[in-house]
Amino acid sequence: MRIKPPGRPDSANMLQPIVHSVFEPNTCSWQYVVACPKTKEAAIIDPVLDFEPAIFTVSTQSADRLLEIVHKHGYTVTRLLETHAHADHLTAAYYIQEILWARGHPHAPICIGENITIVQSFFAHRYNVPREELQNAFDILFRPDDQFQIGELVGIAMHLPGHTPDNSGYHFRGNIFTGDSIFHPDIGSARCDFPGGDARSLWRSLQRLLAFPPDTRLYTAHDYPPSNESAGRDPVPFITVGDQRTLNKHLKNGSTEEDFVAWRNQKDRVMTEPPLIHQALQINIRGGKMPGRSHKGKAMLNYLVNVPKTLLTG
């Protein structure tokens, strides 16, 4: 697990968040602890619950590392922010909420964009998730441009659809946590082939991000550094708007909406499913809670398997 040094206020006259960026290498996911430097209140963004597919086992090392950061710096977590229902890793939001509560911390609500209900409806039908297990899965559903506070930091929930209909970003004065929308310039942009995804919506979300001042930091939910040695680099949590405008291979100055949409749709037609999609979505639409069904202390998930029609009995 790679940890980047926390960001620092850029100016004594402008309250900036302290940002701890923690990379989870198995799913190439960035997790963030965002703290108010005055009050030490904090939010955790997109925490990861570890899953080992070879032995079907959930563990909490990544989430516990975030809790260590909270404890080390004396933070009080007041919100758990999900950018969307990820399809490539399980969320640790509920686990962290429960652990903090057990340790005497205030209840930290799990927050997400209001379009999570669209995603829940689709995948609850696909995976036969009982309706009651989706009730109150999330504590707060943000509407576009809702404002909230972390201590004296003002956050804005940005609706950034395209990858999924529920993808949100969280803006704290010159720092935007973008979820799955814009990626490192050598990667470009997020895929749009999930249910409710739309390349044209993604283009418009990306243009909204690129309209911010050039020194605005865009923190990504994932990074996939090139594996070959000549192009190798470490995972990078953020890129400025200015660098994205000039370097992003999908969005360089001169790129057009129609070209982007055509290219994105063509690319997405041959994309393969994320390895943990079935596990992740069943847990993530529940806000990180395990299914109600269990057997001998083990949670039970549903899987869809492609089989010859002659073998189907129902």
Image (cartoon, rainbow, N blue to C red):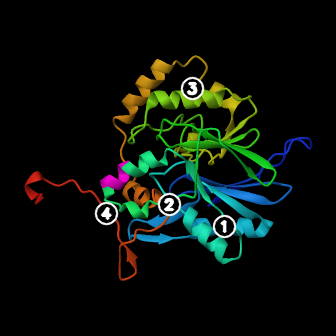
Q: Which residue is mark 4?
A: 302
Q: Which residue is mark 2?
A: 137
Which residue occupies 35% across, 60% down?
129
Q: Amino acid at mark 3?
A: Leu
Horizontal and vertical percent for residue 219? Answer: 65, 43
Instruction: Kindly report the distance in space between the C-alpha atoms of the residues bearing marks 3 and 4.
Output: 39 Å
Q: Which residue is mark 3?
A: 251
Which residue occupies 59% across, 26% down?
207
Horizontal and vertical percent for residue 193? Answer: 39, 38
Q: Earlier in the sequence, mark 4 or mark 1?
A: 1
Residue 49 vertical position relative to residue 208 in the rendered view, above or below: below
Instruction: Kindly report the distance in space between the C-alpha atoms of the residues bearing marks 1 and 3.
Output: 40 Å
Q: In front: 58, or 200?
A: 200
Circles 2, 3 touching at the beta carbon (< 8 Å): no
Q: Amino acid at mark 2?
A: Ala
Residue 40 within the magenta-colored segment of the rendering: no
The image quarter containing residue 38 is: bottom right
Q: Decide: few, some or many residues near mark 1? Use Cα within 10 Å; few <14, some 14-19, many ≥20.
A: some
Q: Which residue is mark 1?
A: 107
Q: Earlier in the sequence, mark 3 or mark 4?
A: 3
Circles 1, 3 touching at the beta carbon (< 8 Å): no
Which residue occupies 56% across, 53% down?
29
Q: Earlier in the sequence, mark 2 or mark 3?
A: 2
Please provide the residue range marked out in magenta: 122-126
- Under circle 2, the secondary element is loop
Circles 4, 1 touching at the beta carbon (< 8 Å): no
Q: Amino acid at mark 4?
A: Asn
Q: Decide: few, some or many residues near mark 3? Use Cα within 10 Å; few <14, some 14-19, many ≥20.
A: many
